[in-house]
Image (cartoon, grey):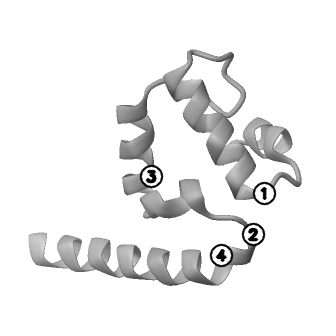
Amino acid sequence: MQQEININIGAKSPDIYFNDLQKQCTEQMPLRYGGIDNMNELMYNLKTHCIPESIFDMTVENYGEFLEQRRKLMAQKMKNYYYSL
């Protein structure tokens, strides 16, 4: 993440800033977390960075679950790349 995005997120838990990010895309709120301003771009960004879509429902307590899901997405991405060679 860019430094200014990290500063805006601060100590907020994922359920807060991902909810804000969704609103940034759906309600045309002022851009607080980067330049993503529509859901298609947001979903593409999550996929590109192997962030599970379930992140929108997660809190800090779900961190272990998040890591498990992300590991699987990253492994699949590497596997797909390997087979594309």
Please name the residue shown 68% across and 34% down the image. 33
Of the residues under marks 2 and 3, which one precedes in the sequence?
A: 3
Gap in angstroms between the C-alphas marked 2 and 3: 18 Å
- The residue that label 2 is drawn on is 60
- The residue that label 3 is drawn on is 46
Question: Mark 4 and 2 residues: CB-CB less than 8 Å, in contact?
Answer: yes
In the displayed structure image, the side of residue 27 where residue 32 appears, left or right: right
Gap in angstroms between the C-alphas marked 4 and 2: 5 Å
Task: Identify the secondary structure beneath mark 4.
Answer: helix
Q: Amino acid at mark 1?
A: Ser
Q: Amino acid at mark 4?
A: Asn
In the displayed structure image, the side of residue 69 where residue 35 appears, left or right: right
Q: Amino acid at mark 3?
A: Leu
Task: Identify the secondary structure beneath mark 3.
Answer: helix
Of the residues under marks 1 and 3, which one precedes in the sequence?
A: 1
Task: Judge by depth and name the residue closer to the eye, 81 or 74.
Answer: 74
- Give the foreground label among 1 and 3: 1
Residue 12 visible here: yes
Q: Is residue 84 above or below residue 19?
A: below
Residue 51 visible here: no
Task: Judge by depth and name the residue closer to the eye, 1 or 61.
Answer: 61
Q: Residues within 10 Å of mark 3 (few under 14, many from 20)?
A: some
Gap in angstroms between the C-alphas marked 1 and 4: 11 Å
- The residue that label 1 is drawn on is 13
Q: Give the image quarter of residue 27.
A: top right
